[in-house]
Amino acid sequence: MQLRQTIDKLLANFLVIIMAIMVLNVLWQVASRFILGSPSSFTDELARYLMIWVGILGAAYVSGKNLHVAIDVLPSRLSEKTQKRLKLIVRILVILFCLGAMVIGGSRLVYITHVLDQNSPALQVPLSVVYVVIPISGLLIIYYQISDILKR
Amino acid sequence: SGTRTLRLGHGLDVSHSVHIAMVKMGEDLERISDGKMKLEIYPSQQLGTERQCLELLQIGSLDMTKVSVGVLENFAPRMKVLGLPFLFRDRQHSFNVLDGPIGQGLLNGGEKYWLKGLGYYDAGSRSFYTKDKPVHTPEDLVGQKIRVMESVTAMDMVSGLGGSPTPISWGELYTALQQGVVDGAENNPPSFYLSRHYEVCKFYTLDEHTVLPDVLLAGTHLWEKLSNEEQGWLQQAVKTSVAYQRTLWLEAENEALEAVKKAGVEIIRPDKTLFADKIEDSFDKYKEDEEFYELITRIQETK
Amino acid sequence: MEYAPILVLVISFICLLAIGTPVAWSIAISSTLTLLVSIPIIPAFTTVSQRIGTGLDSFALLAIPLFILSGELMNKGGIAHRLIAFAKTLVGALPGGLALINIISAMLMGAIAGSAMAAASAMGSILGPEMEKEGYSREFGAAVNITAATTGLVIPPSNVLIVYSLASGGASIAALFLAGYIPGILTGLFLMIVASFWAKKKGYKVGKRSSLKEIFKTMIDALPSLFMLVVVIGGIVSGIFTATEASAIAVLYSLILGFIYREISFPKLPQILLDSAATTAIVMLLIGASMSMSWALSYENIPQEISSGLLALSDNPIVILLIINLLLLFVGIFMDMTPAVLIFTPIFLPVVTKLGLDPVHFGIIMVLNLCIGLCTPPVGSVLFVGVGIAKTTIEKVVKPLLPLFIAMIIALFLVTYFPSLSLWLPRQFGL
Ligand code: NA
Ligand code: NA
């Protein structure tokens, strides 16, 4: 499981960096309003896009650590064998969702914003750069789920 | 085949003239198509902000939407021309341009971005409103933080006049004004009234700097699916809806001005040329883009 | 009305939850299935993806990761300890003194951190062992800790009120924050009364009375921590900065304080940032998924159907509010707060505004109601944290939880039927 540890590490470092930039960015927004007297128009947009990245990429990290909250009242009352089967079904459903909505749907979104040349209003960065986090995160989640299935 | 239901999402309240005219459009469409086409309207941002609705048109899960030109210019850059300050001489001039070949050309130009323009609803002209400091001349804008839409032309316009443009979403603006994050904003009278921003901002300066019409659009996903006959029915319904809305708009504008006056807002009618002169040369920077500059000239030359 | 979409939504959602699918994925998958009823497959997938992505695209939501981070910093930075020491000198000598300390500290801590889970884990780990030493049962301590931690969600700043503001289409965050004070403190007081009676009945020991000097000393110690409240709330209410900017100031402030107290150092920062990012992601995935669910609901006109159905039941506001409260209590049993707020605000808000209710007032009702749900089995994030930290089980905690639930329900009904409990304070500030 060398690969998984490397991916974990990379993802964690990346999240720490985005989170830190997000804090500094909002602090800079306050400072620029008070010290320079004029609000900086790009900080707002940057902060929102960083949050999309933290949220969606973080979802992959959380998925790798199996931290997403679930209700296991019913499963916990079943036999161990059935529980294992249900867990497998849940993992397959998550994989199917990530493949359909996040990887295929997300790639389609990236494709549309790319070919139609859509840029963000303030920073003028291509929106496809913002949205590309969705298929990436989808792929990572699928990887984690498959790796967990194979571990059993 | 059975009935074709078109889904139309927009961000305005159900009491807004545009929504009322859309309801009429739905009735007309059903009548002239003999019940073969229907319109289902989702008001009040139920299906997302204007920006998100445009994306949904491109994605193909929503059929039609209405957005301000200020939002549309981020998708179809040519539309930027309509947002230039003091471009139109008056209301009639703007109708002549929009209903003529230039306006139609801009509507069709959206197809490149999978957005088929259908018509222009009247959104009057936009003016500044401020909280503490009345604006009589452009100099009064200096040092005031003015909320603008997320639009490059709008930001250029406010900084050209001397103010500090601050992009904030419309939904968060009331609180932002109240808390003093911004000192003022700019919009047409009905929006100033319906958003209740007049409760906070007591000065309304009718400088009428921009005419930013609302644009009704269909996704090309839908448009290409419609038969010629269906396209015709839809366009006919749009046409009567647009004409109806323009009469409603005038009433709404007068009512709004009366209502805010009653609520204690001071209506300022400044010398507009002071504002227009201040950014007169702002069109020069578009000279590099020949096609765009020609568009400006053609609009100015329209009778 | 088309029944297929709503049937697909409800049935798939319940089945997914039942087999143990994480809540966020259950929401996302059932919304996707619902959209597939009326939208072709690729546009449906793309729409879900767009809702998840753009659902997070809001400046107001940005306060959430930052308040989570500042809560984390406060936990690790010694701020929580000082608040507890101060609370101890205030009420330590009353019957059930330690339970009261737990409640007051949780209120203070929750007030500053804006997160019930942070409050429950801080108080549970610090006070839990101490309560056991004094002869309190572990389960009673956990029950007090769990319920008290939720009061911090109503007492500002509060992430969930920010979420509500978003879902309601822009109710003023400043007004919501002010509106939360009295209901939150009221609930805390009711919890204290119940805890006090329970402790007396069980004959738990009483702590020693603190001298004025001790009270003064601990207060001075806790002053910098308390001052953070002034900075955050004062800044927002007076308009110096927005809720989001206040959350960034809170991060900076708790970081500096943590450094001064020498309980945080640079090498510890990456882990703190990572933990906050993970907590943020859990919340954000829920928000993004709920955005696709509320889109699917709107697309199929489900809120309109439900609200017209509700209004047809009665035109008496008292009855409708009772029904909504009972429905929300039921929802809270199974669902966590954030998704519940996101899903049910667009459904219920049009109904109650038609009855003349203020959206700010309804926000407080909703959050206070769902606070109870956070503590009820089977799904309750605060319940999970509290039970986990006390190393006991859900079954054992239920008994001491029951009287505390009654206290919370009484507070909920007072807040529901006396709007001024919520609206008086914001009105004083002209909001
Ligand atoms: Na709080
Ligand atoms: Na619960």
Image: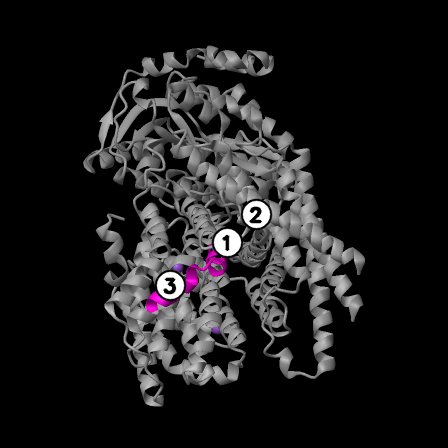
- Above-or-below relation of B277 to C19: above
Find out whether the residues at labels 2 and 1 contact each other: C-beta distance under 8 Å: yes
Q: Where is residue B3 shown, x and y percent of the image?
A: 58, 51
Q: Amino acid at mark 1?
A: Leu
Visible in this render: residue C219?
yes
Identify the residue at horizontal 43%, vertical 33% (top origin): A32
The residues colored magenta run C69-87
The chain letter under disc 1 is: C
Q: Which residue is mark 1?
A: C69
- Looking at the rendered structure, the secondary structure element under dot 3 is helix
Q: Is mark 1 within 8 Å of ligand 1?
A: no
* C-alpha span from label 3 to label 1: 18 Å
- Dominant secondary structure, magenta: helix
The chain letter under disc 3 is: C
Q: Is residue B143 left or right of residue B219?
A: left
Q: Which residue is mark 3?
A: C83
Instruction: Verify whether residue A40 appears in magenta.
Output: no
The chain letter under disc 2 is: A
Instruction: Verify whether residue C80 appears in magenta.
Output: yes
Q: Amino acid at mark 3?
A: Leu
Q: Where is residue C330 shown, x and y percent of the image?
A: 45, 74
- Looking at the rendered structure, the secondary structure element under dot 2 is helix
* C-alpha span from label 2 to label 1: 9 Å
Quadrant observed for ligand 1 in the rendered image: bottom left
- Looking at the rendered structure, the secondary structure element under dot 1 is helix
Q: Which residue is mark 2?
A: A19
